[in-house]
Amino acid sequence: MYNKVILVGNLTRDVELKYTPSGTAIAKFGLATNRTYKDTMSGENKQEVMFIDITVFGRSAEVVNQYLSKGKKVLIEGRLVLDQWVDATGQKRSKHSIVAEKVQFMDNKNQNSGGEFSGYEAPSAPKPQMQQQPQKSNEIPSIDIDEDDIPF
């Protein structure tokens, strides 16, 4: 089974940061994404907007809270989850949301929407370290990778 979602959009509200009793940070915010398509009947270009709730955990949640606010553009990689609850009237309710595993800021430092990547990228796995060896002109540097670092 495979459950992976990649979204690019703008925050619809400021980040809400809370902590669990054990001290784990949880950040929640809304994301708006859109797509443009051509209506086959009228031939007009139309736009479809989706509003998605995003949850981020741990140190990434604290960083997201510190640097993101309503209107900021981000790229989210995560997984789709189904939230279920019973409302005040006793009716069962549910909705889909995203648990972010990676958050990448897309607004540049000058606040232009130039599409440049900048800011913090939440770590997903340790990256292999390159060995510091003198390089000869025609040699390719070797990379020290343990078998545990390979995701497949």
Image: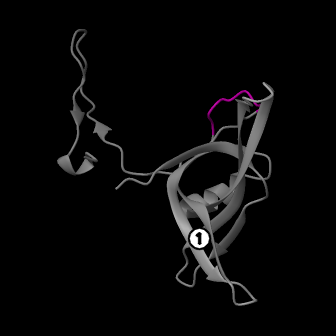
Q: Is residue 135 magenta?
A: no
Percent position of residue 45, x then y: 78, 28
Q: Is residue 78 left or right of residue 43?
A: left
Say which quarter of the image contains residue 142.
Answer: top left
Check disc 1 and report the residue beneath it: 25
Q: Main secondary structure of the magenta part?
A: loop
- Helix, strand or loop at label 1? It is strand
Q: Is residue 122 left or right of residue 119?
A: left
Name the residue rendered at 52%, 82% in the picture: 22
User: Can residue 44 be seen?
Assistant: yes
Residue 51 in the image, given as x and y percentages of width and height? 72, 54
Q: Position of residue 145 (x, y in %)?
A: 22, 41
Q: Looking at the picture, which amino acid does disc 1 mark?
A: Ala
What span is in magenta?
A: 110-118
Q: Quadrant of residue 139?
A: top left
In the rendered image of this protein, does residue 51 appear above or below residue 24?
Answer: above
